[in-house]
Image (spheres, helix red, strand yellow):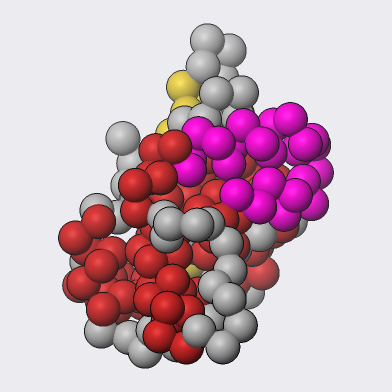
Amino acid sequence: MLYSVRGKLIYAQPKVAVIECGGVGFRCQITMTTARRLPALGAEAMLYTIMNVREDAIELFGFAEQSELECFKQLTAVTGVGPKAGLAILSELSPEKVALAAASGDYKALTRAQGVGPKLAQRIVLELKDKFGALAPSGGSEAPAGAGVPSAAGNAAQAVSALAVLGFTPGEAAAAVGKLDGSLPVETLVRDALKSLAKKG
């Protein structure tokens, strides 16, 4: 399996990038998020990749960030979610927002993606939340106004849960979040924790 491709970017469209490595052009299907991060044609580019082998086709999917790749894997592991839906979701939402939607049960956020209806969005949230439900803060969503410390603890717990949705172990997620200010917004905690986890990797 190809872990990544690095080489000259010879073709780029909103949904496709071709990277030439050693004289071979690798055609990768990409998200809009990755498309926006690509360099100019002719420059060196690197994408994290995953290959999908079907009876009638072999497809390569490429992502600018490892967190996007991990989120794609989690999404396509859900019943009824194929690569096309996974790309559509990640073109509309960042991995952090997908993880937070799953951790908090906000299926409506996923319906913003093209081709993702309420039923599929609910299934995604249900399967991912069930998978990591033990990590989610008790009581679910938001802490009561004025509850400073519980709110900070709740934000940290939601961030840990969201990182688990992205494929990190509870220990890795808790260690990364534990180094941050728990009063920060959940999405900021997830983003900063991802940065520190990427450095360790």
Residue at image coords 30%, 70% = 198
Query: Does residue 4 appear in the picture of this structure?
Result: no
Nearer to me, 117 or 20: 117
Task: Say which of 80 and 139 sits in front.
Answer: 139
- Please identify the quarter of the rendering in which residue 150 is found: bottom left
**Residue shown at the point (48%, 43%) measured from the top left:** 129
Residue shown at 24% from the left, 53% from the top? 169
Which range is magenta? Answer: 105-129
Placement of 184 over or under 157, stated as above or below: below
Q: Is residue 117 visible?
A: yes
Measured as percent of width and height from the top left, residue 164 is found at 36, 53
Give the quadrant of the N terminus.
top left
Observer-nearest of 75 and 27: 75
Verify whether residue 179 appears in magenta.
no
- Dividing the image into 4 quarters, which one contains the C terminus? bottom left
Q: Main secondary structure of the magenta part?
A: helix
In front of the other: 97 or 148 = 148
Residue 25, percent from left and from top: 50, 46
Question: In the rendered structure, does residue 120 fall within the stretch colored magenta?
Answer: yes
Q: Quadrant of residue 192?
A: bottom left
Question: Which x, y percent locates residue 157?
Answer: 38, 66
- Which residue: 58% across, 76% down? 144
Count how many numbered circles sit on residues in the image: 0
Find residue 66 and report its horizontal and vertical position in percent: 40, 59
Q: Is residue 192 above or below residue 18?
A: below
Give the left or right position of residue 91, taking residue 179 as reference: right
Relative to 75, residue 98 above or below: below
